[in-house]
Image (cartoon, helix red, strand yellow):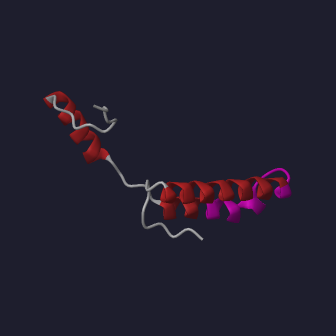
Amino acid sequence: MIAHAHAVPRDPMELRRVLQKMRAWEPFDADALLDDVGAALDDVPDMPGDPRRAVGHLRRMAWTVNELLKRLLVTGQLTNVDVA
């Protein structure tokens, strides 16, 4: 028989621990993450240093966030996220 990583805990202490984690869980908010990236891009003129370098860095960061969201959707880790 194959042991599953997400087997149901049978020990009462383990069940309590899982219940506490579930109660404390907050769903991932992809829109808030993308809003934060957009806000960072909007603030580029106020950043010290070379603005072109900062824009390049933030664009790469935005691309990385977008790719992460796509992969999370494809693997079923996230649902109902509007990714362009």
Q: Position of residue 43 (x, y in %)?
A: 70, 61
The reply, left or right, for residue 18 in relation to residue 51 is left
Q: Position of residue 2 (x, y in %)?
A: 31, 33
Vertical arrangement, residue 60 with respect to residue 39, above or below = above
Name which residue lies at 50% across and 65% down. 31
Decide which of 71, 18 is in the foreground and name it: 71
Decide which of 48, 34 is in the foreground and name it: 34
Where are the magenta residues, as a range? 37-52
Main SS of residues in magenta? helix
Magenta region includes residue 54: no
Name which residue lies at 47% across and 66% down. 81
Decide which of 52, 45 is in the foreground and name it: 52
Magenta region includes residue 43: yes
Task: State which quarter of the image contains the C terminus.
Answer: bottom right
Name which residue lies at 43% across and 67% down. 80
Task: State which quarter of the image contains the N terminus.
Answer: top left
Decide which of 12, 53 is in the foreground and name it: 12
Vertical arrangement, residue 30 with respect to residue 4, above or below = below
Quadrant in the picture for residue 13: top left
The reply, left or right, for residue 60 in relation to residue 23 is right
Q: Position of residue 42 (x, y in %)?
A: 69, 65
The reply, left or right, for residue 84 in relation to residue 10 is right
Name which residue lies at 85% across and 58% down. 52
